Structure formats: structure tokens, C-alpha cells
Amino acid sequence: MIFSKTLIRWYSNNKRILPWRETKNPYYIWLSEIILQQTQVKQGLPYYEAFVSNYPTVFDLANANESDVLKLWQGLGYYSRARNLHASAKYVANDLKGEFPNTYKDLQKLKGVGDYTASAIASICFNEVAAVVDGNVYRVLSRYFGINTPINSSKGVKEFKALAQELIDAKNPADFNQAAMEFGATQCKPKNPDCHICPFQNSCIAFSENRIGELPVKIKSAKAKNKFFNFIVFISEDRKTILEKREGKGIWQNLYQFPLIETTEVVTPATISEAVEKSNYVRNKSFELVLYNKDAIVHKLSHQHLYTRFWIVNTKSVDTEGIDLRRVRDYPVPILIENFIEAFNFE
């Protein structure tokens, strides 16, 4: 098909030089694809390099402590990806003796691997004719063919997958898939795409109908909820603080945080002071409470906005096993807390 040949030709002339494009090793391809889920290349590249350096084989990753994996992932967000990455590494190393599944169907048995990731690995590593459909591909296909079906609807998912599967070059599925993703990332960009130097300009429906800004169509998600997080940062005279591991499901699972008081609205120092007095963290009830940031730090997640304040509690000692202030940076924490730690300059 002309579309496929044109796309692959464009890719051969314009593709970026990236380390995971220099290999067919499924471990490295899988690693790159998990990191690049919901992450741009420029942000994901240093993480990929760090993981390859620290864990050069799937056995190295499998044998790592989850805490170390989360620490290396810190700042990349969507931490379930890191937990799934670690779990799948254990499965491949221990149950499959280090041999990655080599088909689209079997790859989906790995935790954290869905249609897109399985298609990418199967095509790039094993030459299977399995089309990838990610955000970039949705954008390219919806614009070129003028498709109005919402990409985040069940109908849209099926429609675009079928179309991509129809278009894929059966003799060169790896390059076709990478070309489609690369084209969307660097040429057919979300905003200000380079339409005037686009090889598809004469046949692109969105361009001919002046609908570039309208496509792809996406159903608006529910309005994000507001939450108010108050982190209590204890600092004792012997230079200790408290970090707690987040247990159970939810955001930041297995990451560490300062003791948290979650409220439905902005609270006064008196409310925080009362909560500290009732806690089991201080041996005597004599302490100094200081609000670190008057204006809340707004941390936006996909489904909620966190209005965050850090409260410093200076006290003689903490009534629990404290952590030396110099070791705070050793723990995997959410980027929100990492930024505070760097700004506060614990020593």
C-alpha cells in the first residue's frame, strides 16, 4: 500500500537515533516501551539508560529490591509501571528462565503489557505482523483518514486497531510500527504539525478540510477532584525525621512519604497542631509547628488535583524509629515530595 511505503520511506530519512533502535533484544525493547508509556522520549531516555546501566539483564532486574527499582523510577510517575516491570522481570527470569515470550498473545501475559506494548515487542523483536496503536498513531490515522470516532471509546479502539492492522507492511512490520509512532511524535504533532513539509499533504483529509486542530476526537474525562494533603515533617534535635511506606492500592503504592493528614479543605495551624498532639510521633507534647509553604503546591494527576502543604514540626525527639535526615534521599518518594526534599535541603 502506498501509505505504508511512504511512511517507511519517511522514517528511513527522518528517524531519531535512539539506543533501543540499535537492538532486537526483547529485554531492552520491553524496558523502553514500558518507560515510554505516557512519557515523552526526551524524558524517558535518561531513565532507560539508568535502568540498562543498573540492570543490564532481566535477571539483574528480577533480583533487585522493589524499593531500589522505585527509587530509580522516581520522577517518572505512574509508579504501577515500575511495580509491574519488576514483577514481570521476576516472572521472565524465574518461570521462563530468562526467555521472553515471542508472540503477541504470550507477551500479553506479562504484567503491565497490553495490546500496544505486546504489538511493539512482537513486531520489533520477532517480526510478527501486529500493528501498534498509541497516541501518536491515533493522531496520524484520524487526521489522514478524517475519522471522527473518539479514540478513547470502545468503538474507536477497535476501529483504529483494525485500520492499523490493515495498513501495516506485512514484510516489514517493525519499521512500519516505529515509523507510525515516530511520524506522530515528530511530524504530525498535537500542536503546530509540519503540514507544509508532510509527505501526505496532498492526500490528508484533515489538511484538505482544515480540521487538523479538531482531530483526533476524544471524549472528555470527568472533572478532576480536589484533595488537600498536609505532610507533617518531623525534625528532632538528634536530626531524625519520619517516613512512612504507603501500603495498599492507590497512587504511590510502596513509595515513602512524610506522615500525611488528608483533609477536605484548607486547614488552620490549630487543626494540624491538634492532630500532632494526638499522634504517637512525639514523646512529649512540646513542639514548634511551622508552615513551610503558605501557598499550596498543586500537583495535578489525571483524576485528582492535590493541594499540598508541608508542615515542619521541630521537636526534642520522635516517639518511633526515626530516619537520619541525611538518609532521606535514599528512599523512593513521589516527585512532589522529592522536590520538597531538594528545596528544604535536608542535612
Image (tube, rainbow, N blue to C red):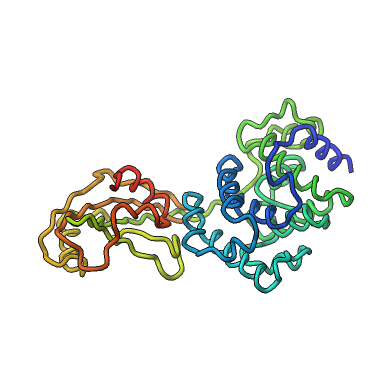
User: In the rendering, at what x and y percent does residue 333 appear?
Assistant: 41, 55
**Residue 318 relative to residue 300: left or right:** left
User: In the rendering, at what x and y percent does residue 59 appear?
Assistant: 63, 64
Q: Quadrant of residue 81?
A: bottom right
Front position in the image: 182 or 222? 182
User: In the rendering, at what x and y percent does residue 129 appear?
Assistant: 83, 56
| As drawn, 202 above or below 54 | above
**Residue 82 relative to residue 120: left or right:** left
Q: Residue at x 84, y 40 (%)?
A: 3
Which residue extends farthest top?
A: 196
User: In the rendering, at what x and y percent does residue 55 appear?
Assistant: 59, 56
Q: Quadrant of residue 324?
A: bottom left
Front position in the image: 137 or 273? 273
Q: Residue at x 37, y 54 (%)?
A: 226
How many discs mark residues in the rendered view? 0
Q: Residue at x 25, y 53 (%)?
A: 266
Front position in the image: 333 or 181? 333
Q: Quadrant of the N terminus?
A: top right
**Residue 284 relative to residue 49: left or right:** left
| As drawn, 311 above or below 84 | above
